[in-house]
Image: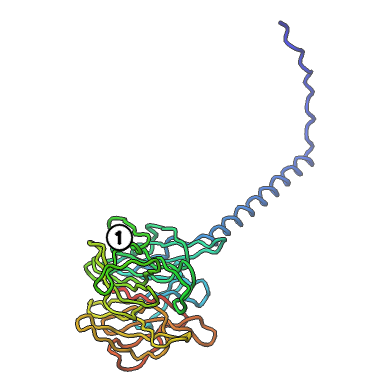
């Protein structure tokens, strides 16, 4: 078989120096455009992505107060050199909607815009480096870490965005960082109310706070228009009510008292006041703060609680403190801040 004839090769004309120079300029221009696009994309991606870790200066050091700063609107973490809030302030930490830290572990709840918006629970180590990320649904609302750093809990608004009305639903999760076991929704916990096993489709839990043994915990449960303080047992996975009209409990460092918000007014937009309950005597008393506080208070030490209130002069929220014994008066701790956590 004879191979098909090939077309004769035509020699390519040599390029002139002027054409070569034009080609070099065109290639260089194209490379510059591509580099600009690449840099722009990188910066855009970096701007959209939340940093998994803050700088090393944001380590969870004892004797520091950490809080969510709202000065720039980004909700990034800041800290002061002392829990009094009067020390040097260091801004620029990770962005969080709610934050808490203890025992070398931090919990940062984030919310990203979109349709629908997405939320995440970020578990961080003592250098605020991300260790685990859990996708969530809803609006971040409460966050707590046990004193050991082993037990974490967070509450999300599944529907609604406030406890003031009745049209809201919550989803509360508990994570054991030692085993990685995650309870996505604690609504199925066996509940004993007034001495009897209780079932109801309208049960909502929120505001978990842990005891030092990482087994006992307290939280709020609502049903049939009432709220209750519950005491839970992780090993037995059971809970029982202790008293009514208790919301967002926060256990003191010595595990003897609970700070909580109590509904003292009906039919208003400012219904609560902060109280402290003695778990031994089950007696309660209000603290000096008379304004309505819609927050889960944080203990700075065994004698002082901190909480957020709407700010003035254009500020979204400020952090205030008051004595746990009810004496004295409330004091401004941090302007433009929420989610206080004193690392001990």
Q: Is residue 167 left or right of residue 28?
A: left
Q: In the depicted view, which residue is nearer to us: 341 or 98?
A: 98
Q: Is residue 43 above or below residue 74?
A: above
What is the crowding at mark 1: few (fewer than 14 residues within 10 Å), some, or many (at least 20)?
A: some
Q: In the depicted view, which residue is nearer to us: 341 or 297?
A: 297
Label 1: state its secondary structure: strand
Count of all numbered marks drawn on residues in the image:
1
Q: What residue is disc 1 on?
A: 176
Q: Is residue 289 above or below residue 97?
A: below
The percent position of residue 196, horizontal first and vertical second, equals: 26, 70
Q: Is residue 21 left or right of residue 137?
A: right
Which quarter of the picture shows residue 142?
bottom left
Residue 147, visible in the rendered structure: no
Q: Residue at x 36, y 85 (%)?
A: 274
Which residue is farthest left?
280
The percent position of residue 107, horizontal first and vertical second, equals: 37, 66
Q: Is residue 343 left or right of residue 225?
A: left
The percent position of residue 324, horizontal first and vertical second, equals: 29, 86
Residue 213, visible in the rendered structure: yes
Q: Quadrant of the N terminus?
A: top right
Q: Residue at x 30, y 76 (%)?
A: 229
Coloration mode: rainbow
The percent position of residue 310, horizontal first and vertical second, equals: 47, 83
Q: Residue at x 75, y 12 (%)?
A: 4
Which residue is farthest top?
1
Q: In the depicted view, which residue is nearer to us: 4 or 229?
A: 229
Q: Residue at x 38, y 64 (%)?
A: 128
Q: Quadrant of the C terminus?
A: bottom left
Which quarter of the picture shows residue 16?
top right
């Amino acid at each position: 078989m004879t191979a098909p004839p090939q077309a004769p090769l035509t020699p390519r004309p040599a390029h002139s120096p002027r054409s070569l120079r034009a080609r070099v300029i065109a290639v260089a221009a194209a490379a510059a455009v591509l580099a600009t696009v690449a840099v722009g994309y990188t910066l855009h991606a970096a701007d959209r992505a939340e940093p998994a870790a803050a700088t090393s200066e944001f380590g969870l050091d004892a004797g520091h107060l950490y809080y969510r700063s709202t000065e720039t609107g980004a909700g990034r973490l800041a800290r002061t050199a002392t829990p009094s809030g009067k020390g040097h302030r260091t801004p620029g930490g990770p962005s969080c909607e709610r934050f808490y830290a203890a025992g070398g572990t931090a919990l940062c709840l984030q919310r990203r815009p979109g349709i629908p918006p997405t939320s995440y629970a970020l578990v961080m180590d003592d250098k605020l480096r991300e260790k685990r990320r859990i996708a969530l649904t809803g609006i971040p609302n409460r966050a707590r870490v046990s004193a050991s750093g082993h037990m974490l809990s967070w509450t999300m608004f599944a529907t609604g965005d406030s406890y003031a009305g009745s049209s809201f639903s919550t989803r509360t999760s508990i994570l054991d960082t030692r085993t990685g076991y995650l309870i996505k929704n604690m609504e199925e916990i066996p509940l004993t109310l007034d001495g009897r096993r209780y079932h109801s489709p309208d049960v909502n839990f929120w505001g978990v706070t842990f005891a030092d043994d990482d087994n006992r915990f307290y939280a709020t449960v609502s049903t049939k228009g009432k709220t209750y303080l519950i005491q839970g047992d992780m090993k037995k996975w059971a809970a029982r009510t202790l008293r009514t009209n208790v919301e967002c409990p926060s256990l003191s460092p010595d595990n003897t008292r609970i700070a909580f918000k109590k509904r003292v007014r009906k039919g208003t937009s400012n219904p609560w006041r902060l109280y402290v309950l003695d778990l031994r005597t089950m007696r309660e008393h209000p603290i000096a703060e008379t304004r309505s506080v819609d927050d889960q208070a944080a203990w700075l030490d065994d004698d002082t609680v901190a909480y957020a209130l709407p700010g003035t002069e254009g500020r979204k929220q400020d952090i205030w403190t008051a004595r746990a014994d009810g004496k004295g008066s409330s004091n401004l701790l941090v302007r433009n801040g929420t989610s206080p956590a004193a690392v001990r």
